[in-house]
Amino acid sequence: MVSSSNTHTQGYKEWALRNRWSEDLRCDCDEHAIFSISKTVDNPWRKFRGCPNYQKFHMDLEEANNNKAFAMEVLKLSEEAKNNKEVQLDILNLLKVELLMMVMLLMVVIVMGFMVHNVMVKAL
């Protein structure tokens, strides 16, 4: 014969399970929470309710981390390109100065050529 204490405990457990599992639980994403069974080492075969989009969100998080890593790499490359651009601008400025000096030297040579030409013409 079953004791009344044991029957009471069983009845309470059944009531608690019925009420807990029959609630209309919703996730933060407003989806109905679904029943799942844990397959982890820590909680094997444990029943729980979870979001039906958990795997999707989990994958989205991995994808977001990958995108973050990609964005960081692009940012790093853009910084390198910016620094490279600054170096290229410095080189371009040096080339401009060098070209200006060559033009000035050419003008001096041309003027000297005219002066030598005038001296030669007068000497004849």
Image: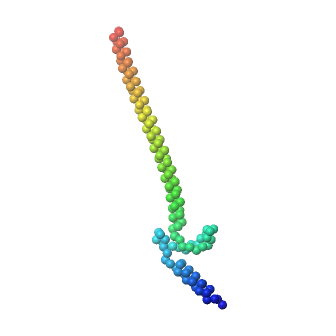
Residue in front for this viewpoint, 113 or 41: 41
Residue shown at 38% from the left, 25% from the top = 104
Q: How is the image coloured?
A: rainbow
Number of numbered tags placed on the structure image: 0
Depicted 34 relative to depicted 60: above or below: below
Image coordinates of residue 35 in percent, x first then y, are: 55, 74
Depicted 32 relative to depicted 1: above or below: above
Residue shown at 38% from the left, 18% from the top = 113
State the residue lying farthest toward the top: 124
Image coordinates of residue 17 in percent, x first then y, are: 56, 80
Q: Quadrant of the C terminus?
A: top left
State the residue lying farthest toward the front: 5
Residue shown at 52% from the left, 56% from the top = 66
Residue shown at 55% from the left, 83% from the top = 15
Q: Quadrant of the N terminus?
A: bottom right
Image coordinates of residue 100 in percent, x first then y, are: 39, 29
Residue 26 shown left or right of residue 105 in the figure = right
For residue 4, what is the image quadrant?
A: bottom right
For residue 117, what is the image quadrant?
A: top left
Depicted 123 relative to depicted 76: above or below: above
State the residue lying farthest toward the right: 1
